[in-house]
Image (tube, rainbow, N blue to C red):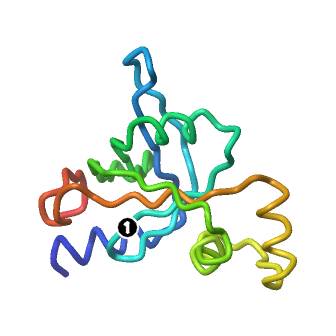
């Protein structure tokens, strides 16, 4: 298996991505999140009331860390965040996040109602570098 295949397999596992953004005062803001990787972008669900929503509306730069603390494996990815607010268009990605972590996925109408009521948006994070140039540990 090539390193790229190993990274793809690692990202398919149900683990957290720690998303780092830059606060207005320059300090980092980090938060662990469930995610879905589609081979091009990382997707994270958040709400309009969360700090990371405000941060990424102001500054789209991010650093992502997908970590396996027990197996000493990790991937570090610089990325640019796009906030996607059309939850109907993004429903397949919201669904993919739930499925990856073994959660029951309600039917589309119920799911849309819940996402709307929670003020959900989707963070689409595009890596700034191609996958082979990401920093990784323990995946060789």
Report the side of 84 relative to 39 (left or right): right
Report the side of 82 relative to 101 (left or right): left
x and y, in percent, of residue 67 in the image: 41, 49
x and y, in percent, of residue 71 in the image: 38, 53
Depth check, front residue: 16 or 62 = 62
x and y, in percent, of residue 22 in the image: 40, 29
On screen, residue 110 above or below 126 = below
Report the side of 136 relative to 74 (left or right): left
Query: Label 1: how many residues lie within 10 Å, few (<14), some (14-19) or many (20+)?
Result: some
Depth check, front residue: 47 or 3 = 47
Question: Outermost residue, bottom direction?
Answer: 107
Picture quadrant of residue 58: top left
Element at label 1:
loop
- For image coordinates 52% across by 53% down, the residue present is 16
- For image coordinates 84% across by 65% down, the residue present is 114
- For image coordinates 57% across by 74% down, the residue present is 93
Question: Outermost residue, left direction?
Answer: 133
On screen, residue 98 above or below 18 = below
Q: How many marks?
A: 1
- For image coordinates 46% across by 44% down, the residue present is 18
On screen, residue 60 above or below 88 = above
Question: Outermost residue, top direction?
Answer: 25
Depth check, front residue: 57 or 30 = 57
Depth check, front residue: 94 or 82 = 82
What residue is shown with label 1? 41
- The quarter of the rendered structure image containing the N terminus is bottom left
x and y, in percent, of residue 39 in the image: 34, 76
- The quarter of the rendered structure image containing the C terminus is bottom left
Report the side of 20 relative to 127 (left or right): right
Picture quadrant of residue 96: bottom right
């Amino acid at each position: 298996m090539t390193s790229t295949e190993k990274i793809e397999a690692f990202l398919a596992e149900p683990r957290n991505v720690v998303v780092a953004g830059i606060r207005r005062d320059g300090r980092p803001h980090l938060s662990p999140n469930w995610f879905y990787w589609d081979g091009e972008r990382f997707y994270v669900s958040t709400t309009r009331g969360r700090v990371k929503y405000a941060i990424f509306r102001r500054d789209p730069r991010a650093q992502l860390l997908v970590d396996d603390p027990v197996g000493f494996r990790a991937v570090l990815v610089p990325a640019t965040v796009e906030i996607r607010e059309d939850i109907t268009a993004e429903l397949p990605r919201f669904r993919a996040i739930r499925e990856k972590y073994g959660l029951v996925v309600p039917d589309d109408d119920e799911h849309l109602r819940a996402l709307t009521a929670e003020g959900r948006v989707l963070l689409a994070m595009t890596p700034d570098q191609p996958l082979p140039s990401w920093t990784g540990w323990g995946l060789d």
